[in-house]
Structures are given as structure tokens and as C-alpha cells.
């Protein structure tokens, strides 16, 4: 009996071992099949990519030839010692050609694509590129997507890097398939090409918290836990508090930077949308402009040019591929200034005229604004040669309405059509926009 039981156990163990080996063999055959299929697909994709690359190169080469001929006929179009980019307007996007003639930059509706070969279509681009996208939630808080790598038919496909929000911090570097990360499929085959730098990262927003305009803390707020805070919320990428609401309800209270910078983002969103809605021919002559939130200049000092330059670069990270030459895109660059944490006003840089225009609801002498020029000039190649104080804007007649008037003046130069002409109207408008839902 014992002998027979032993034989039965051996036979049972053999069959279990055999079953395991069969299952493993099936698994490895499936992996091999997927690998072979994937390799075949990749070869086909590579052939298709090379074909598209050749076709697009011929198109771009022809466009570049036209640009070169235009430059020969009109030397002012591009000065090799000074100008690095040529801008062309198309039906629903803007294209910047570098004078190296090896890269295009496409801009459309808060999206930017830097690419070597481009068929003038965001949705079907194939090749290597650097992609930036900005979207907004229902409270107008931005979400950023920055990807640097390979594309196939407009999707992330191949090897690429994904960055954390609007920063240079890489959160994933590895293979992509059809716009998705690729570690979970045949992970063993690609292990050497996958780098998880910050796995399972939670969604965060960069918020600068101020009292008045003095920076108290520069931190990230976790949105998943933020609902626990009842007297603060986030709109237009600013931390709004009950104190801000009280300020808007009291006509004698001074505006905080959270209020001012909320309106800055509101205008930028509106202007960008309006710009891409006008006709192509009109856009060629449109003086496009941008508002810079107050916290940018607040962090700058006259004796730290390198630090100031880095602050500006961090804010314009999406334009690093064109050497941060934002003046090629925006003809008017507007900075909101808080002087000594006591007074709000606005400056407008018109670099085509080498001019800094001061828009202030309390008129002061020109020397009062030299400190702004001294900080700005090194950041814009010392192009600011003169200061002009504008007299075409309203003036305040009290000591507490500089904030509302700065917002009114921003609205006026933005060309956004909205009837907000008095401090009371502006306070009521902002109160409605910033109140907690």
C-alpha cells in the first residue's frame, strides 16, 4: 500500500511539473509572438515615418526657400546679426521659423509644438518634438502638459520624457505607445529604457501665498486634501481667502496680489482666445500682448540680474526653445508692479519703439520709474531707451483705488470689450468671479 501511494504521488508531482512547464512555454511563446509582432509593427511604422519625413522635408524646404527669397528682396525681414526667427500667420495657428531653417514652432490655443519636420497639423505630426499644452478647469486653474520625445500621427509614440506640470522636473522617461506610457506592456523587454522618477505623483498646483504683496510662502498645495480648508480656495491659479472677498466688498480696502493676478490670468485667457478667432490677414497686423502677474516683478531686485533673468525664464518656460524671445510673439508686454507694497500701477514694454510706457492712476515724475527700467533693461537686451508716462488713462482721487484702477487700465489696453469703468464696477465683477462656488 505504501509503495503504491508513493508511485501515485510521484506521478501526480510529475504531471503538476509538466503542467507548469507547459504553461510557462505558452507564456514565453506569447511574449515572443508579441515581440515579433511589435518588431514588425515598429518596422512598418519606421518605414511610414521615413516616407512622411521625406515628404514633409520637401514641403518645408520649399517654404524655407520662399522665406529666403523674401529675405533677399527685403533685408529688413531678417537680420542675421540680430533676428533669429521669422513669424508667419496661418489660418488658425502661428508658425515661427528659426534662421537655422531646421525647426518650426507652432502656436495655437494654449498649445505649442516645437518640431523639426511639420505638416502644419497638430493632430497628425510624426517625428521628434517638444510639446507644451495648457488647459483650465472650471475655476480657471491651469493644468500643464510638457512632453519631449517622439510622435506618431499626433500621439506620443516612441521614446520620450514627461515633465511635472510647468517645470523641468522629469516624472517619466521611457517608452510610449499610442499616447500612453508603456511600462505595463511587456515590461521585461523594455526595462532598460524605463525610468520612473516620481511614480504615482499626485496632482499639484504651484501657489504663491502673499500677505498684501509680501511673499510668505511658495508651496505646492495638494488638491485632494485642499477641500479640508474651508476659508481658502483656488481660482485663476491664486489662493483666494475670505479676506479677499471682504476687500472686494469694502470700497476702501486695498487689493491684494491674489486679486490682481487673478484678473491678469482672466485677461490673458480672453485675449488668447480672441486672437485665434480673428482672420488670418488681421492677425498679421494685430499688436498681440500679454500681462505678467505681479509676483514676477515682486521677486526681482536691481542688483541681481542673473536671478531676475531666471525668474523670467521660469515664468516663460514654454518659450525656452526660442531663447525666451517672447517679444517675437507679443508686441506689448505688460508688467503689473507693486511699489513698496503700497501702490499698484502698470508698465507696458513696446520693444519695437524701445519704449517703456507707464500707466499709473497717480501721476509721478519720470525719475520715479527709473528703478523699473533698471531692472527690466538687462532682461530685454537693454532695448528700453525711453520712459513715457501715458495721460490717456483714468486717475484716482483717493488713497485706496490704485488696485481697481490698475485692473480697469489693464482691461482698457487689452481690447476685451467689457463695461467696467469705475472701481465699484470692477470690485463687483471680481467679487462675482472669485467667490467660492
Image: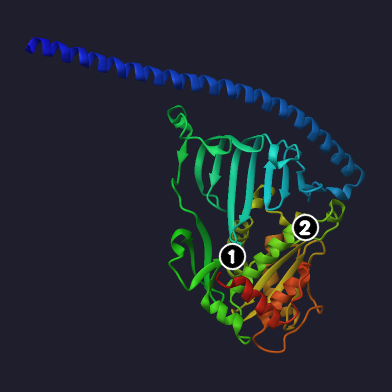
Q: Secondary structure at mark 1?
A: loop
Q: State the scheme by which the image is colored.
A: rainbow
Depth check: 135 or 375 in front? Answer: 135
Judged from this view, the residue extending furthest toward the right is 73
Q: Secondary structure at mark 2?
A: helix
Q: Residue at x 70, y 37 (%)?
A: 124
Depth check: 207 or 143 in front? Answer: 143
Query: In the image, is 404 to the left or to the right of 16?
Result: right
Percent x, y of residue 228: 43, 67
Q: In the rendered structure, find residue 304 and report the number of the disc placed on it.
A: 1
Depth check: 98 or 60 in front? Answer: 60
How many numbered discs sit on the rendered protein? Answer: 2
Query: Where is residue 10, by image quadrant?
Result: top left
Percent x, y of residue 55: 76, 28
Q: Where 343 falls versus 137 (above or below)? A: below
Judged from this view, the residue extending furthest toward the front is 1
Which sits earlier in the primary sequence, circle 1 or circle 2? 2
Q: Where 152 falls versus 298 (above or below)? A: above
The crowd level at tag 2 (other Cα within 10 Å; few <14, some 14-19, many 20+) is many
- Contact between labelled residues 2 and 1, with CB atoms less than 8 Å apart: no
Distance (Cα) linking label 1 and label 2:
35 Å
Q: Residue at x 66, y 38 (%)?
A: 154
Percent x, y of residue 208: 53, 66
Query: In the image, is 18 to the left or to the right of 49?
Result: left
Q: Where 118 falls versus 366 (above or below)? A: above
Query: In the image, is 418 to the left or to the right of 281?
Result: left
Q: Where 17 falls versus 171 (above or below)? A: above
Query: Where is residue 433, by image quadrant?
Result: bottom right
Q: In the rendered structure, find residue 275 and report the number of the disc placed on it.
A: 2
Query: Where is residue 28, by image quadrant?
Result: top left
Percent x, y of residue 83: 78, 50
Q: Residue at x 80, y 33 (%)?
A: 59
Amino acid at each position: 500500500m505504501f509503495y503504491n501511494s508513493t508511485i501515485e504521488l510521484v506521478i501526480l508531482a510529475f504531471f503538476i511539473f509538466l503542467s507548469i512547464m507547459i504553461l510557462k512555454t505558452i507564456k514565453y511563446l506569447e511574449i515572443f509572438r508579441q515581440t515579433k509582432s511589435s518588431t514588425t509593427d515598429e518596422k512598418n511604422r519606421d518605414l511610414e515615418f521615413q516616407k512622411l519625413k521625406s515628404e514633409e522635408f520637401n514641403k518645408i524646404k520649399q517654404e524655407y526657400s520662399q522665406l529666403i527669397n523674401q529675405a533677399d528682396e527685403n533685408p529688413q525681414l531678417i537680420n542675421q546679426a540680430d533676428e533669429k526667427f521669422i513669424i508667419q500667420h496661418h489660418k488658425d495657428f502661428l508658425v515661427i521659423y528659426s534662421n537655422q531653417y531646421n525647426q518650426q514652432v507652432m502656436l495655437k490655443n494654449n498649445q505649442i509644438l516645437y518640431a523639426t519636420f511639420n505638416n502644419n497639423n497638430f493632430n497628425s505630426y510624426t517625428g521628434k518634438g517638444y510639446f507644451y499644452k495648457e488647459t483650465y478647469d472650471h475655476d480657471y486653474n491651469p493644468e500643464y502638459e510638457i512632453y519631449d520625445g517622439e510622435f506618431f500621427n499626433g500621439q506620443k509614440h516612441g521614446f520620450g520624457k514627461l515633465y511635472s506640470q510647468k517645470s523641468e522636473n522629469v516624472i517619466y522617461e521611457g517608452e510610449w505607445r499610442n499616447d500612453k506610457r508603456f511600462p505595463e506592456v511587456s515590461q521585461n523587454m523594455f526595462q532598460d529604457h524605463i525610468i520612473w522618477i516620481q511614480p504615482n505623483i499626485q496632482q499639484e498646483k504651484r501657489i504663491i501665498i502673499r500677505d498684501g504683496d509680501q511673499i510668505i510662502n511658495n508651496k505646492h498645495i495638494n488638491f485632494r486634501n485642499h477641500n479640508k480648508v474651508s476659508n481658502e480656495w483656488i481660482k485663476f491659479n491664486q489662493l483666494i481667502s475670505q479676506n479677499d472677498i471682504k476687500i472686494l466688498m469694502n470700497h476702501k480696502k486695498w487689493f491684494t496680489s491674489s486679486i490682481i493676478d487673478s484678473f491678469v490670468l482672466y485677461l490673458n485667457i480672453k485675449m488668447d482666445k480672441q486672437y485665434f478667432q480673428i482672420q488670418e490677414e488681421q492677425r498679421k497686423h494685430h499688436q498681440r500682448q500679454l500681462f505678467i502677474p505681479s509676483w514676477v516683478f515682486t521677486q526681482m531686485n536691481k542688483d541681481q540680474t542673473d536671478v531676475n533673468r531666471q525668474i523670467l525664464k521660469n515664468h516663460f518656460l514654454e518659450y525656452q526653445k526660442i531663447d525666451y524671445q517672447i517679444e517675437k510673439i507679443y508686441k506689448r508686454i505688460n508688467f503689473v508692479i507693486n511699489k513698496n507694497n503700497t501702490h499698484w500701477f502698470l508698465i507696458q514694454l513696446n520693444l519695437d519703439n524701445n519704449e517703456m510706457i507707464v500707466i499709473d492712476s497717480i501721476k509721478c515724475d519720470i525719475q520715479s520709474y527709473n528703478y523699473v527700467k533698471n531692472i527690466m533693461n538687462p532682461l530685454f537686451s537693454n532695448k528700453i531707451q525711453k520712459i513715457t508716462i501715458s495721460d490717456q488713462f483714468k486717475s484716482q482721487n483717493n488713497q485706496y483705488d490704485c488696485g481697481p484702477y490698475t485692473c480697469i487700465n489693464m482691461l482698457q489696453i487689452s481690447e476685451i470689450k467689457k463695461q467696467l469703468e469705475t472701481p465699484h464696477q470692477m470690485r463687483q465683477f471680481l467679487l462675482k468671479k472669485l467667490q467660492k462656488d
